[in-house]
Image: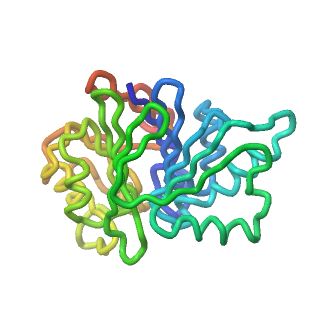
């Protein structure tokens, strides 16, 4: 079983409805956090997710809306009264992430671990594991910035998180026949600038070509809420489409996906 909590379904543009990107994944007793912009830590609390239980932090790229709460999370792990972490923490990101972390720790030295071992690693197109999950990383196109998407496998269940990407063969190949593709759809139509992102129809095209079982859209700029993103996506993909919301919970169990909670919007 893979459980997914959408901590933020939006972008760098703050709205009342959608926070910055962040996805929490649970498999058995293992918690993985993928990305985390500003406000992610407080939404984890709203979702009932204990930040001290997270042992793996994965980042798709270093844009602020995907990484800002890394500072808040590490600061909390170091300085919560009555709590001293001793378990290891792995932080994984794309090419250049080690330098990014070193640069970040200069003005914020308090994020360096006080009482626990921590590894910062970079991945490109390789396989590794986080807890009970196997992970295949793949570099995708997001302008000139190194960016990776992740495919998670737990026994027979699979899911892919696209991160930020434009249409490319890499995201199609990584998503092939997955149970769930959680895919960015930054804009409603191709009339917007999709040079570094996907529109609803392009996300649908990825899902169609990859023959995914279920497609969940996230990373919406505010303009997306003025359109029927499901209808636009369905022009390219005839499978199940979910429009995610903040604090929505999804579960893949025996290759079946269900929405087990949606705390905000119907």
56 in relation to 250, above or below:
below
Toward which corner of the image does residue 244 lie, by quadrant? top left
Q: Nearer the viewer, residue 266 or 124?
A: 124
Q: Give x and y (percent) for residue 151.
A: 33, 45
Q: Is residue 63 visible?
A: yes
Residue at the right extreme, as displayed: 81
250 in relation to 142, above or below:
above
Q: Is residue 185 visible?
A: no
Q: Is residue 199 left or right of residue 31?
A: left
Q: Give x and y (percent) for residue 76.
A: 75, 46
- Quarter of the picture containing the N terminus is top left
Toward which corner of the image does residue 83 lie, by quadrant? top right
246 in relation to 28, above or below:
below
Q: Is residue 53 left or right of residue 153?
A: right
Residue at the bottom extreme, as displayed: 144
| Total numbered circles | 0
Which residue does the image show at 62% across and 56% down from the upper left?
38
- Quarter of the picture containing the C terminus is top left
Which residue does the image show at 45% across and 38% down from the upper left?
265
Residue at the top extreme, as displayed: 254
Q: Give x and y (percent) for residue 4.
A: 44, 35
Q: Give x and y (percent) for residue 112.
A: 74, 56
97 in relation to 27, above or below:
below
């Amino acid at each position: 079983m893979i459980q997914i909590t959408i901590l933020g379904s939006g972008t760098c543009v703050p709205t009342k409805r959608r926070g910055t990107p962040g996805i929490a994944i649970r498999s058995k007793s293992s918690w993985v956090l993928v990305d985390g912009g500003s406000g992610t830590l407080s939404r984890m609390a709203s979702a009932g997710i204990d930040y001290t239980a997270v042992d793996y932090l994965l980042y798709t790229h270093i844009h602020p809306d995907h990484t800002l709460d890394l500072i808040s999370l590490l600061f909390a792990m170091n300085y919560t009264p009555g709590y001293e972490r001793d378990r290891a923490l792995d932080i994984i990101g794309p090419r250049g992430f080690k330098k990014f972390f070193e640069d970040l720790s200069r003005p914020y030295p308090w994020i360096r671990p006080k009482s626990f071992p921590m590894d910062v690693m970079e991945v490109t197109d390789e396989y590794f594991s986080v807890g009970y999950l196997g992970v295949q990383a793949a570099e995708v196109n997001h302008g000139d910035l190194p960016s990776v998407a992740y495919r998670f496998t737990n026994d027979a269940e699979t899911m892919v998180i696209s991160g930020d990407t434009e249409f490319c063969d890499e995201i199609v190949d990584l998503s092939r026949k997955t149970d769930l593709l959680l895919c960015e759809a930054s804009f409603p139509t191709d009339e917007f600038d999709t040079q570094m992102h996907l529109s609803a129809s392009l996300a649908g095209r990825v899902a169609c070509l990859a023959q995914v079982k279920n497609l969940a859209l996230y990373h919406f700029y505010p303009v997306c809420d003025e359109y029927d993103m499901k209808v636009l996506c369905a022009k390219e993909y005839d499978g199940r489409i979910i429009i995610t919301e903040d604090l929505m919970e999804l579960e893949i169990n025996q290759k079946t996906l269900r929405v087990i909670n949606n705390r905000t919007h119907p």
